[in-house]
Amino acid sequence: MSTPKLPIDLNTAIAHGLRPDWFMRDRLGKMPDIWQEQLLRSRSKQVIINAGRQIGKSTVVAAAALHCCLYQPGALVLVIAPSQRQSRELFIKIHDFLGRLEPAEKLEEETKLSFVMANGSRAVVLPGDGRTIRGYSSPALILMDEAAFIPDEVFDATLPMLAASSEGRIFLLSTPYTPAGFFYQIWHNADGWERYEIPTAECPRVSKEWLEARRKEDPLRFDREYCCTFSNADAALFTPQMLDAMVAYDFEPFNPSRTLFGEDTAANAVSIQAERIIWLKRQLPRDAGLVIDCTGVGVGVADEIERRGIYPTRVAIVHGQDAHWSGSRVSLPKRVGLEDCGADPRRRDQGPPDNQRLADAEA
Ligand SMILES: Nc1ncnc2c1ncn2[C@@H]1O[C@H](COP(=O)(O)OP(=O)(O)OP(=O)(O)O)[C@@H](O)[C@H]1O
Ligand SMILES: [Mg+2]
């Protein structure tokens, strides 16, 4: 009878069971960064990680998840993110790590959204939707990736799953977002959570020069994406409350004299943005002004719109500087910019901002 091939001796196998950081180093081939090592060695039941982009959040929790599946037979690991596509990204990281194990770990079952190991442990991707997430109990580990973007109702539906599991753990990991929601509340107010705050500057794989270029492009976005800073409601053009109040599900047809449309030009292809803005502009009277924030992606959108024969007023909406004019460009601090064009953010019922005053400023 042949003896099963062991990649490591029994002592090392036991050491890996006790030390997930050594497991990551030796069996997954990645040396944990200092904070990743601390996290892997922690036994806290509730962990919250507020960190910058690309710092290695998903990687370290994927290693923790696989360690849990291997060393706690019968464990259930749940993977949740704002969308199923994002949860699957994390699941794929766990699965990739699984594929690195030598000898290969035998799976009993495998789908695009779950696997079951021979020892009965399971990893399952859940949809980011509070109504369909129920039905799992006593998970050994819940991972909520990009948690600041997960709706509160999903968290509310998830947390009770741990009620009957004295050993169950939950890791919330995210870049910060607005000062609202469960991730923000737990980070600032809750007791009983182990906290990790890791700005991207601490990542040995990201260069200072690359980060400095991002800071120059957009300081506010830089703070949020790379420096663990929640968007500051005071600095924002619209507060979360204003945005909530602006959502209309049941509205009268367009009334151009009372309507200002806004479009966040980030995160979409320039041509798609330009197309949509031109379409919206055509719904308005011919003399309606079109003002484009040319801080960042807006430049390309404005260029594309001009190429199509429409000439917007270019403004730079920035935070914390005095208004200034340079050539044909106008820079306005966000709050003053709003007030300048007639929309006092404290009095939303005042009527529409007057785009023309911005255009006048340029002339
Ligand atoms: N300890 C490590 N050693 C080597 N590479 C690592 C380590 N940790 C993470 N990485 C690599 O760094 C990159 C970013 O990792 P990861 O996706 O986990 O970061 P993240 O913080 O989740 O990023 P995002 O903010 O985009 O979600 C990946 O290529 C990953 O393989
Ligand atoms: Mg990630």
Image: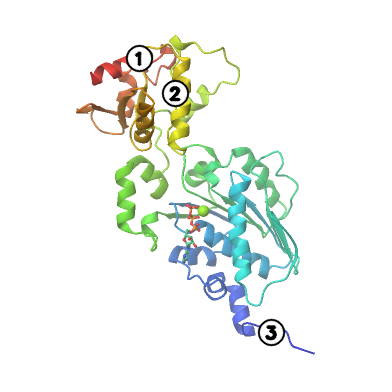
Q: State which tag comes first along the sequence, 3 or 1.
A: 3
Residue at the disc numbered 1 = 354
Query: How far, Cα to Cα, is label 3 from label 1?
Result: 76 Å
Contact check, label 3 and label 2, Cβ < 8 Å: no
Q: Nearer the viewer, residue 219 or 263?
A: 263
Residue 176 lies left or right of residue 253; in this view the side is: left
Amino acid type assigned to the residue bearing label 1 in the image: Asp
The quarter holding residue 273 reads: top left
Which one is closest to the eye, mark 3 or mark 2?
Answer: 2
Q: Which residue sits at x=59%, y=39%?
A: 151
Q: Could you tell me residue 218's position as x and y percent?
A: 33, 41
Q: State which tag comes first along the sequence, 3 or 2.
A: 3
Residue at the disc numbered 2 = 278
Q: Is residue 232 visible?
A: yes
Q: Is residue 228 visible?
A: no
Q: Could you tell me residue 12's position as x and y percent?
A: 59, 82
The label on residue 307 is none
In this rendering, the answer to whether 229 lies above or below 309 is below
User: Element at badge 1?
Assistant: loop
Task: Pick the quarter of the image with the C terminus.
Answer: top left
Q: Please rate how many residues cluster around mark 3, counting C-alpha atoms within 10 Å: few if below 14, some from 14 to 19, many from 20.
A: few
Residue at the disc numbered 3 = 5
Query: How far, Cα to Cα, is label 3 from label 2?
Result: 66 Å
Amino acid type assigned to the residue bearing label 2 in the image: Ile
Residue 3 lies left or right of residue 317; in this view the side is: right
